[in-house]
Image: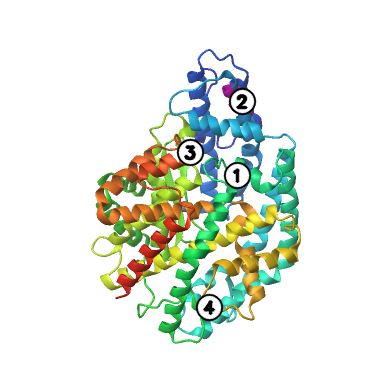
């Protein structure tokens, strides 16, 4: 043993960096006689540390009102992990300098080499400054409230009113939500100015011309380029945007209105009343067991384990952080799903989506080293988005949640959402490319104008006249642009991959699930195109391939509407 490992993540729950640093230091200074043993111990250490931090994060998000949990989470996220990253680069450098490799480790080593190449000591304080700016953005957006008929509501709580049958209610909800962001526009623009400066500096320090070039490297995008993303944007403009315009025209006719305004895009067209798939957590979990079991007994068994071992925290309750996620207990080798279910169809989609991520964790856990089980976002979202489409036919009773007519309505909504979201992804990605490469991304006015111009390329069929500021406010709401720059095109790549799996499943459902599971089991050991190929898909950036999938979605929508 090179390092005396803590016996479990719980054993280091209260540790500070001072107690953790010697564990890394031992690996950094040990004489390496057998690289495989050294690597195994490092991997095991990473699992324990990662799981300890994850447990702190889970505890805090499940109960944000407990100051002790908040402090513990902060200790891990802002004190321990940033310092651990520096040590990880140091250990990675040792391994790379040894020239060691073994089968299945090539892509991990490629990632290590890239991290080493772009690491700069002087960027460490810039990253921690960025964390502070991100926290300031979260503070602003987390504190936004509106007055709804005398009642204080958060912006997300307006969501149900955007689906109201009464057009005046929808308009009011839309305007209040946009207004909340418009009032903070100057403050958020000033924050973004600082983030922009900071990121461009990080890029320059690492020897890159701009932050886009840096981001492609740091996100390990080895298999596609900014030019591919620009092609993706053009393909969305040519294929998705006209399809969304047709959706909106259909909507206009069904609603019997002159033009579709932004507050008309979410009201349900088919059913007489809003869908209510379940009323308590058991009503969410029990059908999900049946759905996954009938898709594949092994996936069903994995989901059952999570449900039975307390690895699902699904219901919305006071004090819980918003949103949903699937995370991994790296040491124990089990996933954990967190969400805020309130009984709407979105909750069902979220659970199925997060379950797709959890199947990825189960499938890749057999890989020997922790880094081989970590996957890129493009791969991760292929697992979750494909699961949404593959499970869709099973959401009907008696297996799932909905009587037949409601199942049809839910599927229509989900497929419409696929098209609308692709347009939004292109907007967000094209906008970020413009921000960091145009040379004008540092000017708040020009930035807003650029968003409007880009938005017009990709979003058609909605009448925004007289609502320019409201339309601008949309990008300030997109937290990725502030918190995770350039993280968005991954969803588009994965959605097109998922549509390819769905297309295959129409003629070969069993084979598709088998290939899906084979691809997931690869973890992070192969390049992205190979992972997609194993699943029966490819990376799509071009108009022809994208157009075929858009046509398939449109014809399925046509069939469902009849
Ligand atoms: Zn996801």
- Closer to the observer: label 1 or label 3? 1
- The kind of secondary structure element at disc 1 is helix
Residue under the image location 52 percent in, 48 percent down: 59
First along the sequence among labels 4 and 1: 1
Rendered image: mark on residue 216: 1
**Which residue is labeled 3 in the image?**
374
Residue under the image location 30 percent in, 57 percent down: 286
Number of residues whose C-alpha sits closer than 10 Å to that of mark 4, classed few (under 14), some (14–19) or many (20 or more): many
Q: How is the image coloured?
A: rainbow
First along the sequence among labels 2 and 1: 2
Position in image of residue 72 (x %, y %): 60, 44
Rendered image: mark on residue 455: none
First along the sequence among labels 2 and 3: 2
Which residue range is magenta in the image? 90-96
Rounded to the nearest angstrom, the CA distance separating label 2 from label 3 is: 19 Å
Between residue 537 and residue 165, name the one nearer to us: 537
Rounded to the nearest angstrom, the CA distance separating label 4 from label 2 is: 54 Å
Circles 2 and 3 in contact, beta carbons < 8 Å: no
Circles 4 and 1 in contact, beta carbons < 8 Å: no
Circles 4 and 3 in contact, beta carbons < 8 Å: no
Q: In which quarter of the image is the C terminus?
A: bottom left
**Which residue is labeled 2 in the image?**
93
- Closer to the observer: label 4 or label 1? 1
Position in image of residue 114 (x %, y %): 60, 34
Q: Determine whether 170 is above or below 46 in the image.
A: below
Number of residues whose C-alpha sits closer than 10 Å to that of mark 2, classed few (under 14), some (14–19) or many (20 or more): some
First along the sequence among labels 1 and 3: 1
Circles 1 and 3 in contact, beta carbons < 8 Å: no
Q: In this rendering, does residue 16 appear at all?
A: no
Rendered image: mark on residue 263: 4
**Is residue 136 toward the left or the right of residue 97 in the image?**
right
Considering the whole magenta stretch, tell me its main secondary structure: helix
């Amino acid at each position: 043993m090179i390092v005396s490992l803590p016996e479990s993540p719980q054993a280091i729950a209260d540790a500070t960096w001072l107690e953790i640093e010697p564990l890394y230091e031992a690996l950094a200074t040990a004489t390496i006689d057998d690289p495989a043993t050294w690597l195994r111990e490092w991997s095991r250490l990473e699992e324990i540390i990662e799981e300890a931090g994850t447990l702190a994060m889970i505890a805090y998000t499940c109960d944000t009102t407990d100051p002790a949990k908040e402090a513990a989470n902060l200790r891990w996220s802002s004190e321990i992990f940033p310092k651990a990253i520096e040590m990880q680069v140091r250990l990675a450098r040792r391994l790379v300098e040894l020239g060691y490799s073994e089968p299945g480790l090539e892509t991990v080593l490629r990632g290590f080499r890239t991290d080493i190449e772009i690491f700069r000591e002087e960027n460490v304080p810039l990253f921690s400054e960025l964390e502070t700016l991100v926290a300031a953005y979260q503070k602003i957006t987390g504190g936004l409230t509106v007055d709804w008929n005398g009642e204080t509501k958060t912006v997300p709580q307006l969501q149900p009113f955007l689906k109201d049958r009464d057009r005046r209610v929808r308009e009011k909800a839309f305007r209040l939500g946009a207004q909340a962001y418009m009032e903070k526009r100057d403050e958020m623009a000033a924050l973004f100015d600082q983030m922009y400066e900071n990121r461009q500096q990080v890029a320059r320090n690492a020897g890159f011309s701009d932050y886009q070039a840096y981001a492609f490297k740091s996100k390990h995008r080895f298999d596609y380029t900014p030019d591919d993303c620009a092609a993706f944007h053009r393909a969305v403009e040519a294929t998705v945007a006209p399809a969304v315009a047709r959706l909106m025209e259909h909507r206009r006719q069904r609603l019997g209105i002159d033009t579709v305004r932004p507050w008309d895009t979410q009201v349900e067209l088919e059913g007489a009343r809003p869908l209510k798939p379940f009323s308590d957590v058991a009503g969410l979990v029990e059908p999900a067991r049946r759905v996954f079991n009938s898709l594949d007994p092994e996936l069903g068994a994995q989901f059952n384990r999570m449900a039975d071992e307390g690895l699902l925290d699904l219901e919305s309750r006071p004090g819980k952080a918003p949103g949903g996620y699937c995370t991994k207990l790296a040491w124990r080798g089990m996933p954990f799903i967190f969400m805020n279910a309130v009984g709407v169809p979105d909750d069902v989609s979220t659970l199925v989506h997060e379950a797709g991520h959890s199947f990825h964790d189960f499938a890749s856990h057999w890989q020997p080293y922790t880094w081989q089980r970590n996957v890129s976002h493009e791969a991760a979202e292929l697992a979750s988005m494909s699961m949404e489409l593959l499970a869709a036919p099973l959401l009907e009773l008696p297996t799932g949640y909905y009587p037949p007519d409601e199942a049809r309505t839910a599927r229509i909504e989900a497929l419409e959402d696929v098209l609308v979201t692709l347009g939004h992804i292109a907007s967000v990605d094209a906008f970020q490319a413009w921000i960091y490469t145009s040379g004008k991304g540092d000017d708040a006015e020009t930035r807003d104008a650029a968003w409007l111009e880009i938005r017009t390329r990709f979003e058609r069929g909605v009448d925004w006249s007289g609502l320019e500021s409201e339309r601008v406010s949309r990008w300030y709401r997109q937290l990725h642009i502030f918190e995770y720059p350039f993280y968005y095109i991954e969803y588009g790549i994965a959605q097109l991959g998922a549509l390819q799996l769905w297309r295959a499943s129409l003629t070969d459902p069993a084979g598709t699930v088998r290939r899906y599971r084979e691809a997931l089991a690869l973890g992070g050991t192969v390049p992205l195109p190979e992972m997609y190929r194993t699943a029966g898909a490819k990376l799509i950036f071009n108009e022809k391939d994208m157009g075929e999938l858009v046509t398939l979605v449109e014809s399925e929508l046509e069939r469902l509407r009849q």
